[in-house]
Image: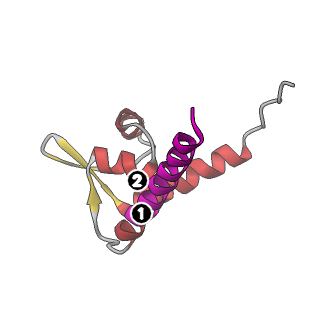
Amino acid sequence: MSIYQEVLRSELGSLRDDIRRLHEAVVTLDPDRSFTVEEAAEFLRVHPQTVRTQTKIGALPSTRIGKRYTYAKIDLINFRERRKKQIDSSPKLRQVK
C-alpha cells in the first residue's frame, strides 16, 4: 500500500469518527426522541440483532407499537452505561506475549 493510500485510509477513519460524534451530538439535543431497532443499534454501536436479543431477555426496556419496538433515549443511555460498567468491572483477559 502506498503512503498516499495510507494517508487516505487514516483520514477516512478520522472523518468516520467525526461523523459519529456529530450524529450523537444531534441525537443528544432531542431528549424525548424515540429510536427504532436500527437507530438504537447505531446509537449503542452494536448489531441490530444485539438490540433485539437484549430486548427479548429484558435487559433493554422498550415499547412495542404494533409489530415494532421503540426505545427511549434515556433507556439507551442507561443501558450503555450499565454495559460499560460491566465491561470495566470484568476480569481482564491475560495478555499472551
User: Which residue is depicted at the point 38% across and 48% down?
Assistant: 42
Side of 33 where 66 appears, left or right: left
**Picture coordinates of residue 11, whole percent (x, y):** 51, 53
Report the quarter where the N terminus lies: top right
**Residue 70 visible in the displayed image:** yes
Whichever of callouts 2 and 1 sits on the residue coming sooner in the sequence is 1
Residue wearing tag 2: 43
- Disc 2 marks which amino acid? Phe
Q: Label 2: few (<14), some or many (≥20) within 10 Å?
A: some
**Picture coordinates of residue 54, whole percent (x, y):** 42, 38
Residue wearing tag 1: 24
Residue span colored magenta: 1-23
Residue 17 falls inside the magenta stretch: yes
Q: Provide the secondary structure element on which disc 2 rests.
A: helix
Q: Is residue 32 above or below residue 5?
A: below
Q: Provide the secondary structure element on which disc 1 rests.
A: helix
Q: Pointer 2 and pointer 1: residues touching (CB < 8 Å)?
A: yes
Report the quarter where the C terminus lies: top right
In the image, 8 versus 84, the foreground residue is 8
Residue 96 falls inside the magenta stretch: no
Labels in figure, total:
2
**Picture coordinates of residue 31, whole percent (x, y):** 35, 72
- Disc 1 marks which amino acid? Glu
Q: What secondary structure is the magenta-colored segment mainly?
A: helix
Q: Is residue 14 above or below residue 67?
A: below
Residue at the far right in the pictured view = 97
In the image, 22 versus 14, the foreground residue is 14
User: Which residue is depicted at the point 32% across and 73% down?
Assistant: 30
**Residue 61 visible in the displayed image:** no
User: Which residue is depicted at the point 35% across and 50% down?
Assistant: 40
